[in-house]
Image: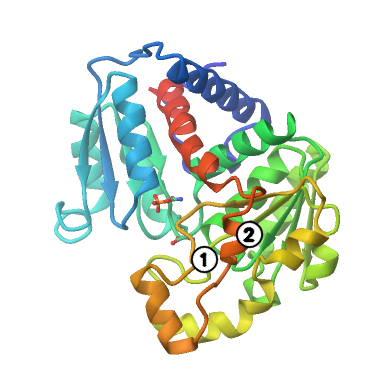
Amino acid sequence: MNLRGRHLLTLLDYSPAEIDYLLDLAADLKEKKKERIFTEYHKGKNIVLIFEKTSTRTRCAFEVAAHDLGISTTYLDPAASQIGHKENIADTARVLSSMYDGIEYRGYGQEIVEELALYSGVPVWNGLTNEFHPTQMLADLLTIRESFGTLKGIKVTYLGDARYNTGNSLMVACAKMGMHFTVCTAGKYFPKDDLVAQCREIAAETGGSITLTEDVAVSVVGAQVISTDVWVSMGESAEVWSERIADLRPYQVNRTVMEQADKEAIFMHCLPAFHDNKTAVGREVYERYGISELEVTDEVFESAQSVVFREAENRMHTIKAVLAATL
Ligand code: CP
Ligand code: NVA
């Protein structure tokens, strides 16, 4: 398998075999890291990390993964570069790819990372756009595979806002890997029809399936993975909170949901999660709307079924695999 020079913009661009290869490589790199075996395969290379939105996991995962591979990093935060304000994407791509061996981009529209890739002479990795979050999906797939020993045939139910990056990407990932993906949310939060249709075509070939429903009890029966994400994403206006809470509260992951799922079910969340009011946003929502647990209850988040911190750790191992394979 040779992925050298490839961009990672969405998993739609990768075959199931290529995804499997990245997961195997990530598992191997994870093992090596635990055994403290050095993996400086790309010593002397440089990559740039562009973040137009904030991050904890993705930035740290790229930085640690790069360091472990012998790669140096430059971090550009939303305020520290000319991108978009004084310099267009095509010019930025050509400048950065003359100095760096790879470019990570986190920001807004998918078309921005696509344009960056079009003009870049080096691999571009999508670190989250409004539409897709492919590196998160590699971590999610590795986590699921570790839990169940396989991906094919695994039943995943996603509750909440399914029309944004995480919901879209999980649907793509499950379709690619022959998994059964159910979206359960209010109809206006379903992923777009054309993406659903595209994923159904992929699933028809891989033996997976895509189901959309508004019925929580139906959606979770037999589910081995219960997943969710925040109800308001980065870049969205704070004004949408009241509507989101009203619409999505019935789709909160709570004890009842977990009890109705498969008894071996795991809970997943890309994080950060609003499961208490120990954050500024959590407190603000609590003061305005009187609820302190949003997309997931604290009880589920902290339960033995929750694998969210292993999932977060796997961000680093899977991003390392992407860097190792594409550089
Ligand atoms: N899951 C995820 O992408 O986290 P960060 O926003 O902290 O990078
Ligand atoms: N949907 C979330 C994911 C964060 C990792 C957001 O875009 O804010």
Instruction: Identify the secondary structure beneath mark 2.
Output: helix
For the C terminus, the quadrant is top left
Q: Are marks 1 and 2 in contact (CB under 8 Å)?
A: yes
Residue 103 x, y percent position in the rendering: 31, 37
Q: Which mark is residue 275?
A: 1
Between 100 and 228, the residue placed more toward the observer is: 228
Q: Amino acid at mark 2?
A: Val
Instruction: Judge whether 276 appears above or below 237 on screen.
Output: above
Instruction: Judge whether 213 appears above or below 54 on screen.
Output: below
Q: Which quarter of the picture shows residue 192?
A: bottom right
Mark 1 vs mark 2, CA separation in Å = 9 Å
Q: Is 133 left or right of 237, judged from the image as shown?
A: right
Residue 60 x, y percent position in the rendering: 33, 40
Crowd tier of the residue under label 2, counting other residues whose Cα lies within 10 Å: few below 14, some 14–19, many 20 or above = some
| Residue assigned mark 2 | 300
Crowd tier of the residue under label 1, counting other residues whose Cα lies within 10 Å: few below 14, some 14–19, many 20 or above = many
For the N terminus, the quadrant is top right
